[in-house]
Amino acid sequence: MLKAVIFLIAVAGVFGGKVFAPYAYHPDAYDAAPEPFDFGFQTADEFGTQLSRQESGDASGAVSGSYGYADANGIWRKVTYTADAGGFRAQVDTNEPGTDSKNTADVTVNANPAPAPVVYKHPVVKHVIPAAHVYAPYTHPVVKAVKVH
């Protein structure tokens, strides 16, 4: 086993590390200039949940956009962001319960009051037993004593 390990170390030394990296790195092939782009979507499902996203970038590599969420109960969040030579900055607008308007790093949070909870009223169902199925209280049958001879 020791001979095999020594042999592999010798082979690796002969090839100088080219066994695992046969291709040279060419910065021009990997560091292409940014191309402008623009995309977005909006969608809603059968439960009333809405999702959206929009993003665009320019030839300098700056990117800006937003994404958002809203549910059927009125809870929502929208994040607007920019990433450029000045770094990443975001603004969060929301009414999610438990959020506070505290700004950390380069993120601004605008917390709004949460909506009142949705209360679903269920219909009152009265269980009526038809007259044909009215049950009389249980009584023991009358048993007559029988005289056995």
Image: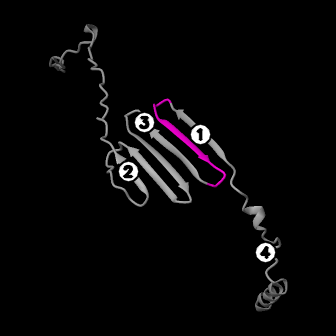
Image quadrant in which you'd find residue 48: top left
* Residue that numbered label 1 is attached to: 40
Q: Are marks 3 and 1 in contact (CB under 8 Å)?
A: no
Depth check, mark 4 against mark 2: the one in front is: 2
Q: Secondary structure at mark 4?
A: loop
Pick whichever of labels 3 and 1 is earlier in the sequence. 1
Mark number, residue 17 = none
Horizontal side of 71 relative to 40 (left or right) equals: left
Horizontal side of 36 relative to 23 (left or right) equals: left
Depth check, mark 1 against mark 4: the one in front is: 1
* Residue that numbered label 4 is attached to: 20
Farthest residue in the top direction?
132
Pick whichever of labels 1 and 4 is earlier in the sequence. 4
Q: Which residues are magenta?
A: 46-61
Q: Amino acid at mark 1?
A: Gly
Q: Amino acid at mark 4?
A: Phe
What is the CA distance from the residue labelled 1 to the residue labelled 4? 41 Å
Residue 14, percent across and down?
Answer: 84, 86
* Residue that numbered label 3 is attached to: 71
Q: Are marks 4 and 3 in contact (CB under 8 Å)?
A: no
Q: Categorize mark 1 by other alpha carbons within 10 Å: few (<14), some (14-19), many (20+).
A: few
Q: Secondary structure at mark 1?
A: strand
Residue 53, percent across and down?
Answer: 54, 41
Quarter the N terminus occupies: bottom right
Image quadrant in which you'd find residue 147: top left
Horizontal side of 51 relative to 14 (left or right) equals: left
